[in-house]
Each structure stands twice: as C-alpha cells, then as structure tokens.
Image: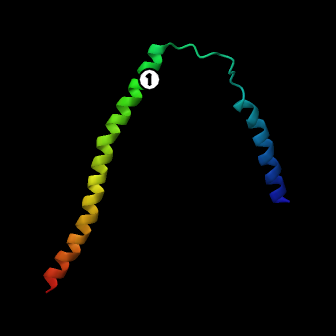
C-alpha cells in the first residue's frame, strides 16, 4: 500500500511539473546579424585554441606519471641489492 501511495504521489508531481517545461514560446525568429555570428565563432575559436596547450600539458603530466612509476620500481630494486 505504501509503495502504491508513493507511486501515485510521484506521478502526480511529475504531471504537475511537465506543463512548466513547455511554457516558453518559440515563435521568435532568429534576427541577429552576421557580426554576432562572427563574434561567437571567434569566441569559440579562442576557446578551442586555448584547449590545445592544456591538452598537451595534461598529456605530458600523465606521461611523466606513468614513466615515473617505472623509475620508482627500478630505484627500489637497485637499493635492495
């Protein structure tokens, strides 16, 4: 009985929340000019170009971590002998 009550309450709350999702109107026509699109494209280009050095740096860090683990194992083996 408790499960049925919880299910009914959940479904009721979902039904009450759904109409608000469609409340926005989409009747406007996109009217921004070419300069706005060019500016947004330039911003996207800046972000992508800044991601390239970040990815290369991250790749170098991961590469050093992987190489460093192998060196630590070799160093431990040499110390024990």
Residue at screen point 79% across, 53% down: 6
Residue at screen point 19% across, 76% down: 74
Whether residue 65 is situated above or below residue 8 in the rendered picture: below
Place of residue 61 in the rendered image (x, y in percent of width and height, measured from the top left): 27, 55
Place of residue 9 in the rendered image (x, y in percent of width and height, measured from the top left): 80, 47
- Taking the image as shown, residue 62 lies to the left or right of residue 71, namely right
Whether residue 56 is situated above or below residue 23 in the rendered picture: below
- Taking the image as shown, residue 23 lies to the left or right of residue 2, namely left
Whether residue 45 is situated above or below residue 53 in the rendered picture: above
- Taking the image as shown, residue 51 lies to the left or right of residue 15, namely left
Place of residue 35 in the rendered image (x, y in percent of width and height, measured from the top left): 44, 14
In the picture, which quadrant includes the N terminus?
A: bottom right
- Taking the image as shown, residue 57 lies to the left or right of residue 36, namely left
Residue at screen point 16% across, 85% down: 80
Question: How many badges with numbers are in the image?
Answer: 1
Residue at screen point 19% across, 81% down: 77
Whether residue 25 is situated above or below residue 50 in the rendered picture: above
Place of residue 54 in the rendered image (x, y in percent of width and height, measured from the top left): 31, 43
Q: Residue 81: name its quadrant.
A: bottom left
Of residues 30 and 15, the one drawn nearer to the viewer in this rendering: 30
The kind of secondary structure element at disc 1 is: helix
Q: Which residue in the structure is indicated by mark 1? A: 40
Q: Residues within 10 Å of mark 1 (few under 14, many from 20)?
A: few
Coloration mode: rainbow
Residue found at the far right of this picture: 1
């Amino acid at each position: 009985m408790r499960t049925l009550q919880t299910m009914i309450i959940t479904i009721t709350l979902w039904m009450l929340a759904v109409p608000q999702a469609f409340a926005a109107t989409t009747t406007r026509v996109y009217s921004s000019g070419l300069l706005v699109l060019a500016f947004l494209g330039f911003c996207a280009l800046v972000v992508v170009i800044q991601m390239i050095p970040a990815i290369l740096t991250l790749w170098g860090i991961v590469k050093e971590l992987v190489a460093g683990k192998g060196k630590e194992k070799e160093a431990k083996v040499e110390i024990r002998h």
